[in-house]
Image (cartoon, grey):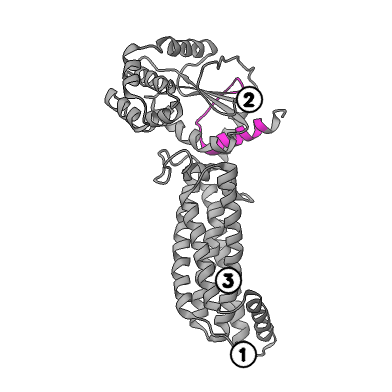
Amino acid sequence: MVETPIKKKYLVSAFIFALIGFGISWYMLSHTIEIQYGIRETPSFCSISSFIDCDAASASSYSHTFGIPNAAFGMALYGLLIFLILTGILYNTLYLWLQTTFAFILVSLALLSSVYLAFISVFVIKTLCILCVADYCVNLVLFILLKKSLNTGIISSIKESYRITRELLQSRENGNLAYLFHTKLTGLLIIIACLAAPSIKKAHLLDENMALMYQKYIEYYENQNPVSIDIQNSPVWGNKQAKVTLVEFADYECPACRASFIPIKMVLPQYRDTIQFIFKHFPLSYHEKAYPASHASLCAQEQGKFWEYHAKLFQGELSLHEFENYAHQLNLNMDNFKTCMASNKFKSTIEKDIAQGSTIGVQGTPTLYLNGKQIKGKITVQFLNQLLAKIINETPK
């Protein structure tokens, strides 16, 4: 007989938080799939800054474990917790104790995983995902609630659960055995369903034709001879000493450039120490707002805010009023910015980028070069991740 009763008020609260956790994980799973396979074309609500960016976190290779999105494991965990807590409440005290202890062990493991992933996020990817933080907080609250519901020591709870399980297994009552079978089978089905969901979705989104297309793009890349690109005085993001160089020729008014900005922005943070990313201005003649946008970005660069301004141009409207508004938002010296815009002082810089792009074969935007070789095809998170990882691994340290 269990001497210490379960405190159901904490268990009911834990059930509610498990539901919240399941909802967060479901959204994160959908979000990860959209990011990885190029479905999402606009920043998410939780993509707030260069540091607080759940899009970049979802694009990272750390968003998967054994090829499965971490959010799928979260759905499996919370689904099983919901089942354990609910069925535990509905059965007698013996089963309730066993269910609660098992749930507590699962949450303890999830909390350890949360600490590890939080460390990776802040110190490796250097990007904070607020959805992930919400998930970590849910795990912490569940840990506290389940601990309070047990109202005894952790080791004592585990020992008592082991004793109860042995009694149930040795019992001749078919009800007990049926209950154990029902619990394990249902829990297993929940886990399988949750883990299979992203694989089914992936098979639907990334079919055999798309995989072959990516392979052709990589073969096209590998069969080229690299071209020389002068990156002196161009804005550089990442490690300026890196041996892997990604150069983009783009037009701020170009719809395709705006679409490719999203996956590039998502993928790059995890490679900040191993690549250098260079932006080259290539405003097309029939885009009237592209040239002044490029000039505005160079005026921002003069005050040390190129990349912040660059992001606003790709994600916002283009007009003289907005150019000044972006400068104000970034706390630039407005007098200097307006003087710079009026002077047209960076005309030669832009024309030099255009001439260089034309010389090496740039015919449209966006055009990207990785270590001097042109990247062909639509830029998606999965494709860019695959190509960058391949080239980084092949490049001598």
Where is residue 331 drawn, in percent x and y?
A: 36, 30
Q: Tell me: residue 377, above or below residue 135.
A: above
Placement of 168 over or under 32, stated as above or below: below
Residue at coordinates 45% horizontally, 75% vertically from top-left?
Answer: 12
Q: Is 45 left or right of 280, judged from the image as shown?
A: left
Query: Residue 3 appears in which quarter of the rendering?
Result: bottom right
| Label 2 vs label 3, nearer the camera | 2
Q: Which residues are magenta?
A: 370-392
The residue at the point 51 percent across, 67 percent down is 142
Q: Position of residue 302 (x, y in %)?
A: 43, 20
Q: Position of residue 394 (x, y in %)?
A: 70, 30
Residue receiving disc 2: 241
The residue under label 3 is: 104
Q: Amino acid at mark 1?
A: Met
Give residue 249's mark. Answer: none
Indicate which disc residue 1 carries. Answer: 1
Choose top left, top right, bottom left or bottom right for residue 342.
top left
